[in-house]
Image (cartoon, rainbow, N blue to C red):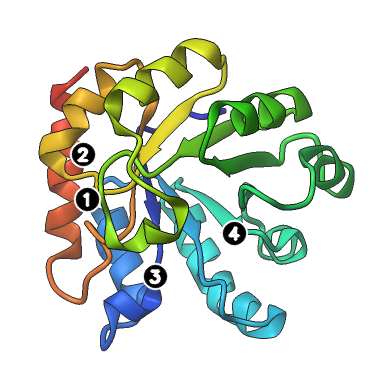
Amino acid sequence: MIDFNLYVITNRHLCAPKSLLTVISEILDVGVSAIQLREKDLDEVALYELAKPISDLCQTNNASLFINTNVQVAIDVGAVGVHLPDIDVSVDKVKAQSNSDFLIGCSIHGVDAAKKRETQGADFITYSPIYPTASKLGYGPSVGVANLEKLVKQIKLPVFALGGITPARAGECLETRAAGVAVMSGIMSPTGAGKRAEEYLSALCGCK
């Protein structure tokens, strides 16, 4: 069940010198309830070692943890699901590897990909980049909230706006009937991560 409207995406390099576990603890303390562990440069062993204590912490705080790409690590650490890149293994194959409660999020960058993932049985999607952002330069120009609204109208899945999202922009994203926003650099920081997360949660709560 997708019952969150803020989806925090990790980047341990942005958190340095503070540990990612410490930063995640800070944002969980203020009410973040969904996290995607996106540390794509790690091999399977290193990813498991990073993910296990984070998964334990998320479970203690009743938060949902998704592991980017690596289905086996997600299963082994007890995450609630996995997040798949735009071009990756099919949702059907992941569902065959996991149990019926396993949740699958997918990154998409256009309507065709969104419809394909919906047909495959994804549980939610992130659509990016909504606004200009340095972290999404490889995905072409920003699509804007008008295209976000068009996509939301064509897809039954929960859609999370991603890319250049600030607390001030959260409102216009929700006005499109998007399920929420996904954020990385706006929250991942060695200083003030909890306060940053609070600002997003407050903005999203005020938009309801």
Q: Residue at x 35, y 62 (%)?
A: 135
Looking at the image, is mark 1 or mark 2 earlier in the sequence? 1
Specify the amino acid type for callout 1: Val
Q: Nearer the viewer, residue 83 or 205?
A: 83
Q: CA distance from mark 3 to mark 4?
A: 12 Å
Q: CA distance from mark 4 to mark 2?
A: 23 Å
Q: In screen coordinates, is 41 left or right of 20?
A: right
Q: Nearer the viewer, residue 94 or 49?
A: 94
Q: Label 2, on which residue?
A: 201
Specify the amino acid type for callout 2: Leu
Callout 3: SS: loop
Q: CA distance from mark 2 to mark 3?
A: 19 Å
Callout 4: SS: strand
Residue 17: image quadrant is bottom left
Q: Label 4, on which residue?
A: 68
Q: Taking the image as drawn, is residue 174 in sight?
A: yes
Looking at the image, is mark 3 or mark 1 earlier in the sequence? 3
Q: Label 3, on which residue?
A: 11
Looking at the image, is mark 4 or mark 2 earlier in the sequence? 4
Q: Which dot, 1 or 4, sits closer to the camera?
A: 4
Residue 127: image quadrant is top left
Q: Taking the image as drawn, is residue 178 in sight?
A: no
> Where residue 19 appears, x then y in whole percent?
34, 82
Q: In screen coordinates, is 106 left or right of 121?
A: left
Residue extending furthest toward the bottom: 17
Looking at the image, is mark 2 or mark 3 earlier in the sequence? 3
> Where residue 114 appears, x then y in whole percent?
60, 29
Q: Are marks 3 and 4 in contact (CB under 8 Å)?
A: no
Q: Are marks 1 and 2 in contact (CB under 8 Å)?
A: yes
Q: Residues within 10 Å of mark 4 (few under 14, many from 20)?
A: many
Specify the amino acid type for callout 3: Asn
